[in-house]
């Protein structure tokens, strides 16, 4: 008896604990709910990923490029499914010993599941992709259709497929008859104008009557003007070209003529005012699909394909390389493929032009073209810059500073003296190489990349000739080397660098790169370079060596050491030509006055150097290096700013200083153009000076030492700097008008950015500021004290203000300008016309952020985020009570604002008054407890577009797509937006109506509607005027609605939804506190859903099937008696995967036999506390008696994908499933049946079905069987059948036969000894 009572007692305790439990106890007592929620969420994620995968596969078949956010989502979803598989397996392994659960295990698992649920939910929320990919093809076709676009420029590196794509565009345009004429010709490097004119004229049936190029062009021009729509494809354009010289009209001369040109050089597109479209390389998957197709390979898992995939990877995504290599290897044997793969790995393929000649030829043309249009020397130097890039490791993010200093070392751009001017020449060269497609942009500032195939091409160029290079990414043994090499780069040669040849004669060697071991080597070894007399550049990584091995390198100009161990640094004096010395992360034994003998030293960088004493050890050592042009000393040092005054040539400076190293007087370096000075013990930076940057931390003394830097500083960061009440004029009287970025943090004395109260003239200040970041400023009162200066913040694009408790006004403007009713162009106010992003957090004294006039000036605002501003009442309004303006006109502001997020603003009442934000698409408002309405619209306001007061609120946010409001308990109503796609409202306790007004056309675009925990919510609209009304019910036509969720809205009255595409329907506790809705729903042409306290949920009309439903969850619907008003008309539920019914007390049955036979995708079935339900599937005689059309031609019922069945607390349930044959549940993994007191059979036979002798019911996948508290159970399966359950060796449990009544059904059953299950109760 105790065993029988215990589970019920536990359940009672658990139910009582749910309401009062802390979050920790929740893991104990709500284990079942958490498990169910986790499984549902995980299954939903699995299904959603399958759908996204399907869309991606289809997009790839259409050669679309998959968006990065789609790739990221799929990667994250796959990771979560893999990580949660273990949790799912752990759930499946759960066991019960009698009635006592394992509490410790349950708590631990429950906690893990609860932590995963929101992560999965977030993935599901972000999985609604309108498109998963795009194609440059589609971009081009859209551009040819766009008004105002006359010329489209398709650019990309050689071999990327520009010509192929252009031909596809031309073919498509012809086949679809998008243009009257489509003509394509190739320009090449030296275009023959007459030949091109002849080809174009032939397309238009023109015979020339003149012989000169100009005369022919005029004839062709007039002939083409007579054709309405023309597409001209110009392939392989090498330089800017005037189409009029051929005779092609476009633009104002012929708006119907569109020109598509392909080029390797982006600058050609820019110069010719093209709509630019870049064609990038293929992804790994896309490359393999193309390679497999061109090589004629089957899509299988053969060994040949494995090798072919490795070969395809070597082509690095370049379509031209892929096509050439794949075609060249088509039909080869497996050994042939293996040989080709090895040749790729060894780079020997570069010497066989028959294999890669198709790639080399276009690349060689681009390389040679670098000289065109410039003098021979400059062209040679650009080419050498390109070749130097090939010395760096494969896929390396090449540091531009390192590249430039190496280039200086080999003597590039000798006619320019200063490093700064040489740097500019190098930057120009790199831009030219990028635009020529020979170099790629990098994801990191200050770096560049070279595509692997392009790198191999460069190695092919340097395999012979004057500039002969040897580059090895890995080295196991020293290769045969002769003295003809001019550059050698050996990477990852850790195992053999110790046996570097003692005396290697390289009489022509100018550049040497060596990389050794990845850790310190205590044993010193000698690297001898005695015979490298011509060496100019030496770059070493992770190498331990002594400079005594450098007896004489008279031509060495550049020495870079990365993470090296360097001894005898004074021996540098043997390198009298050295101009550039960089020691990065290198351990040295000291620096002394021998360094002064390097009279030619122009560049010195000491960054992360390891030594026992600070650098330099002797005072005024650096100050005597009078030839220095750039000095970068990042580690701890003894330098004083004043001693640098003697460095009259210094143009770039990077220093990390302690506060005691700052002098009281200012220092002047007249030629200084770039600097990065960091002051403070805690803050450090290894960045070299690319801009003028100043970081000061924990400093309370005078800043006068930096007076000459403040006037042109570009990036200023002040952290815990005291003694300054403002930036202007205290720090700089001139207005810091070159400052682009300002970061202020914990500067407790600072009250304003600028004080203009005592200004006597026309101040210009902060005119170039782009980014403003202010954090933890306890005294900050505003940005400007006094009249705003000229051009104040006119270029500001991004503002972040956090934790400024005293801040009351951010953007202050003159009250007079605010009261005067002048046109926006005439108002003398501060303009924020460039501002794009505003983030305000934890500013407790703010009541408003923008005034109406200032908001009008913000023409480019795109994102607004506000959080933890407790006193904020409205976003657009007046900061002081005395600031009053007559609101008799509508404010049109923020024309580009798309996203608005407001969180945790306790006093916010509404966003704004009488404001039209036409571009706003997404609004998220959370935890704003005083919010009454989204915006306050005066009744006197009339929108001229609509001309009626009643409709005026409809256009305040006319483009709104997403509205999400949570935890706003005082919200009373919203306005209505006809373009809404997603509406989510949760925890709004006083909300009675979702919308205060009505839309006669409904919500034509609504896709998702979620209403949760709104206890006073009565209806969707406060007024039914102008709407379709059925009795007291509103009819809502939402043709694109896919998700409908209404939970815990007990006062909600019925409304009727027509949603043909519904995929997810969740209703829980809807209208239970209101009156029963008895109104009959009239006959429509299609079915509908009744949301509310109604007896019938689905009103099926006209044979409508609801076939799109995936998930159906119904909980706490106390009056629902039937789900479907006419079973016979519901044809199919073929996509239903999850069905949950809970506490639907009056529900009697669910499916008709025909409906049940269509549930081929059903995976999860959960039914609990449905007290009146007798059968899950209606008997055939019940169907025919309750509908006009009985089910005919029934298919055998089968549930091929059903994996989980949970049926509990259904006290009138007689049986679960009728079936015609035994294998009805082939994938069933979990069957839980509890507390169904009248249940006699779990499975029963359909009428007139006979049992075949010795037939078995097999449950091959069953992992968990639980049958508890079933006192009426007689048979598990029909008489004459036996059932077989698989063994589970990991958890043996003996079947307790004494709990089962002996019967014929049990005697013939096959019980395996190892099975997870519970006992039956009679």
Image (tube, rainbow, N blue to C red):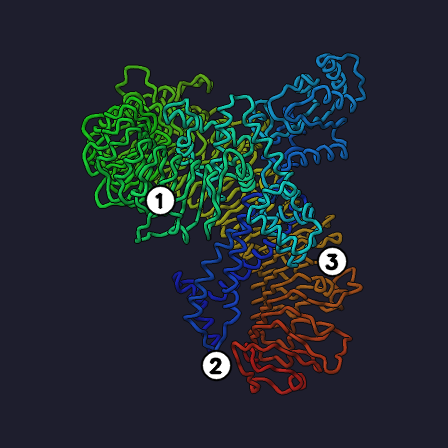
Image quadrant where one finds the C terminus: bottom right
- Relative vertical location of residue 355 with respect to residue 375 in this rendering, above or below: below
Instruction: Give left or right: position of 1221 versus 713.
Output: right
**Residue 778: in sight, yes or no?**
no
Element at label 3: loop
Q: Position of residue 169 (x, y in %)?
A: 70, 34
The residue indicated by pointer 3 is: 1131
In the structure shown, which secondary structural element does the residue marked by tag 1 occupy? loop
Say few, some or many: other residues with alpha carbon within 10 Å of mark 2 (under 14 / 14 to 19 / 20 or more).
Answer: few
Image position, residue 966 (x, y; %): 47, 47
C-alpha distance separating marks 2 and 1: 87 Å
The spot of residue 242 in percent (x, y) is: 64, 19
Give the residue drawn at x 66%, y 53%: 336
Residue underneath mark 2: 3
Report the residue at 53% width, 52% height from top. 75
Quarter of the image for residue 637 reads top left
Q: Are marks 3 and 2 in contact (CB under 8 Å)?
A: no
Q: CA distance from mark 1 to mark 3?
A: 87 Å
Secondary structure of the residue carrying numbered label 2 = helix
Among the 4 quarters of the image, the one containing residue 229: top right
Give the tally of numbered discs: 3
Q: Position of residue 1030 (x, y in %)?
A: 66, 47
Left or right, 252 with respect to 741, comes to right
Q: Nearer the viewer, residue 1237 or 861?
A: 861
Residue 494 drawn above or below residue 915: below
Please tell me which residue lies in front, 1073 or 612: 612
Vertical comparison of 815 with 1063: above or below: above
Mark 1 = which residue?
528
> In terms of depth relative to the viewer, which is nearer, 388 or 254?
388
Mark 3 crowdedness (10 Å alpha carbons): few <14, some 14-19, many ≥20:
some
Q: Which of the two labelled residues, at mark 3 and mark 2, occupies the earlier sequence position? A: 2
């Amino acid at each position: 008896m105790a065993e029988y009572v215990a589970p019920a007692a536990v359940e009672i305790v658990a139910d009582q604990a749910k309401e009062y439990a802390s979050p920790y106890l929740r893991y104990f007592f709500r284990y079942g709910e958490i498990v169910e929620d986790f499984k549902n969420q995980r299954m939903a994620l699995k299904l959603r990923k399958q759908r996204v995968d399907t869309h991606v596969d289809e997009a790839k078949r259409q050669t679309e490029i998959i968006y990065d956010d789609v790739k990221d989502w799929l990667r994250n979803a796959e990771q979560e499914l893999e990580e949660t598989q273990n949790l799912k397996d752990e759930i499946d392994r759960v066991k019960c010993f009698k009635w006592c659960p394992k509490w410790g295990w349950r708590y631990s698992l429950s906690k893990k599941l609860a932590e995963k649920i929101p992560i999965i939910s977030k993935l599901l929320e972000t999985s609604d992709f309108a498109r998963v990919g795009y194609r440059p093809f589609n971009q081009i076709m859209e551009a040819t259709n766009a008004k105002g676009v006359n010329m489209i420029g398709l650019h990309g590196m050689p071999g990327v497929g520009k010509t192929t794509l252009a031909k596809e565009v031309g073919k498509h345009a012809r086949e679809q008859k998008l243009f009257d004429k489509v003509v394509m010709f190739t320009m090449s490097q030296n275009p023959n104008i007459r030949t091109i004119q002849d080809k174009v004229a032939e397309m238009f049936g023109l015979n020339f009557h003149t012989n000169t190029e100009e005369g022919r062009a005029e004839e062709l021009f007039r002939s083409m003007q007579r054709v309405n729509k023309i597409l001209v494809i110009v392939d392989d354009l090498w330089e800017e070209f005037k189409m009029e010289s051929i005779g092609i009209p476009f633009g104002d001369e012929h708006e119907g003529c569109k020109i598509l040109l392909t080029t390797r050089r982006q600058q050609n597109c820019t110069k010719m005012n093209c709509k630019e479209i870049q064609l990038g390389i293929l992804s790994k998957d896309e490359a393999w699909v193309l390679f497999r197709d061109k090589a004629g390979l089957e899509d299988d898992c053969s060994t040949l394909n494995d090798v072919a995939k490795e070969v395809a990877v070597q082509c690095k995504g370049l379509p031209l390389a892929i096509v050439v290599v794949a075609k060249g290897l088509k039909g080869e044997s497996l050994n042939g493929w293996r040989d080709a793969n090895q040749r790729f790995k060894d780079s020997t393929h570069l010497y066989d032009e028959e294999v890669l000649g198709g790639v080399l030829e276009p690349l060689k043309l681009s390389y040679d073209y670098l000289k065109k249009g410039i003098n021979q020397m400059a062209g040679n130097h650009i080419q050498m810059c390109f070749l130097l890039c090939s010395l760096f490791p494969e896929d390396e993010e090449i540091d531009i500073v390192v590249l430039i200093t190496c280039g200086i070392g080999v003597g590039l751009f000798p006619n320019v003296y200063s490093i700064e001017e040489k740097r500019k020449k190098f930057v120009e060269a790199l831009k030219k190489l990028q635009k020529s497609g020979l170099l790629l942009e990098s994801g990191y500032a200050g770096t560049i990349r070279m595509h692997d195939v392009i790198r191999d091409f460069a190695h092919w160029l340097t395999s012979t000739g004057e500039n002969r290079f040897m580059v090895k990414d890995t080295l196991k043994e020293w290769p045969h080397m002769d003295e003809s090499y001019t550059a050698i780069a050996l990477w990852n040669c850790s195992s053999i660098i110790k046996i570097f040849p003692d005396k290697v004669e390289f009489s022509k060697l100018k550049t040497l790169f060596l990389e050794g071991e990845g850790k310190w080597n205590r044993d010193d070894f000698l690297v001898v370079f005695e015979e490298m007399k011509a060496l100019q550049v030496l770059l070493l990584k992770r190498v331990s060596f002594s400079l005594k091995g450098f007896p004489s390198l008279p031509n060495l100009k550049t020495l870079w050491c990365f993470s090296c161990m360097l001894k005898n640094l004074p021996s540098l004096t043997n390198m009298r030509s050295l101009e550039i010395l960089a020691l990065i992360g290198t351990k040295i034994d000291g620096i002394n006055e021998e360094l002064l003998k390097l009279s030619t030293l122009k560049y010195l960088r000491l960054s992360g150097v390891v030594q026992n004493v600070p650098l330099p050890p002797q005072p005024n050592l650096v100050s005597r290096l009078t030839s220095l042009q750039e000095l970068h000393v990042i580690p701890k040092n003894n330098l004083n700013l004043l001693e640098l005054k003697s460095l009259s040539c210094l143009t770039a400076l990077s220093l990390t200083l302690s506060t005691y190293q700052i002098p009281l007087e200012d220092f002047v370096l007249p030629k200084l153009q770039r600097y990065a000075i960091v002051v403070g013990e805690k803050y450090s930076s290894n960045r070299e000076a690319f801009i003028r940057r100043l970081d000061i931390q924990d400093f309370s003394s005078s800043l006068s030492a930096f007076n000459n830097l403040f006037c042109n500083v570009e990036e200023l960061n002040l952290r815990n700097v005291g003694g300054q009440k403002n930036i202007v004029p205290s720090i700089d009287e001139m207005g810091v008008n070159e400052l682009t970025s300002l970061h202020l943090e914990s500067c407790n004395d600072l009250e304003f950015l600028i004080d203009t109260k005592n200004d006597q003239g026309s101040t210009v200040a902060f005119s170039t500021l782009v980014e403003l970041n202010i954090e933890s400023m306890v005294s900050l009162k505003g940005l400007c004290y006094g009249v705003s200066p000229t051009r104040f913040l006119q270029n500001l694009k991004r503002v972040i203000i956090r934790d400024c408790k005293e801040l009351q006004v951010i953007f202050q403007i003159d009250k007079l300008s605010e009261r005067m009713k002048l046109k926006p162009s005439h108002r003398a106010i501060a303009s924020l016309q460039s501002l794009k992003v505003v983030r305000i957090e934890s500013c407790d004294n703010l009541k408003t952020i923008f005034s109406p006039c200032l908001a009008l000036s913000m023409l480019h605002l795109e994102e607004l985020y506000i959080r933890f501003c407790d006193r904020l009442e409205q976003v657009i309004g007046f900061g002081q009570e005395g600031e009053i303006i007559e609101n008799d006109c509508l404010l049109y502001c923020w024309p580009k604002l798309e996203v608005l997020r407001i969180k945790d603003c306790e006093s916010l009442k509404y966003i704004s008054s009488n404001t039209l934000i036409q571009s706003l698409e997404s609004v998220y408002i959370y935890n704003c407890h005083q919010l009454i309405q989204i915006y306050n619209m005066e009744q006197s306001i009339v929108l001229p577009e609509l001309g009626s007061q009643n409709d005026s609120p409809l256009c305040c946010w006319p483009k709104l797509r997403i509205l999400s409001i949570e935890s706003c308990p005082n919200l009373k109503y919203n306005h209505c937006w006809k373009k809404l796609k997603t509406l989510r409202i949760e925890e709004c306790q006083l909300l009675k109506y979702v919308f205060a007004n009505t839309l006669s056309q409904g919500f034509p675009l609504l896709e998702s509607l979620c209403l949760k925990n709104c206890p006073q919510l009565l209806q969707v609209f406060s007024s039914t005027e102008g709407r379709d009304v059925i009795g007291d019910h509103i009819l809502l036509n939402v043709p694109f609605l896919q998700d409908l969720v209404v939970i815990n809205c007990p006062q909600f009255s019925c409304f009727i939804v027509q949603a043909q595409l519904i995929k997810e329907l969740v209703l829980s506790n809807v209208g239970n506190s209101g009156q029963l809705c008895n109104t009959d729903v009239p006959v429509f042409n299609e079915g509908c859903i009744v949301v509310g306290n109604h007896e019938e949920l689905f009103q099926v009309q006209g044979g409508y099937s609801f076939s799109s439903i995936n998930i159906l969850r119904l909980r706490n619907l106390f009056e629902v008696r039937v789900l479907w008003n006419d079973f016979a008309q519901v044809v199919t539920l073929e996509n239903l995967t999850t069905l949950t019914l809970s506490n639907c007390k009056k529900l009697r049955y669910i499916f008709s036999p025909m409906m049940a036979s269509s549930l081929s995708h059903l995976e999860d079935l959960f039914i609990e506390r449905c007290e009146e339900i007798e059968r899950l599937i209606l008997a055939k005689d019940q169907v025919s008696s309750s509908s006009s059309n009985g089910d005919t031609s029934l298919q055998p019922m089968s549930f091929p994908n059903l994996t989980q069945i949970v049926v509990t607390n259904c006290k009138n349930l007689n049986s679960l499933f009728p079936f015609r044959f035994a294998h009805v549940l082939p994938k069933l993994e979990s069957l839980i049946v509890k507390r169904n007191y009248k249940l006699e059979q779990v499975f029963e036979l359909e009428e007139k079905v006979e049992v075949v002798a010795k037939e078995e019911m097999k449950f091959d996948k069953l992992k968990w069987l639980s049958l508890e508290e079933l006192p009426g159970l007689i048979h598990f399966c029909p008489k004459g059948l036996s059932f077989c359950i698989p063994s589970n060796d990991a958890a043996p449990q003996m079947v307790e036969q004494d709990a089962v009544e002996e019967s014929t059904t049990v005697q013939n059953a096959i019980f395996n000894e190892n099975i997870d299950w519970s006992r039956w109760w009679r």
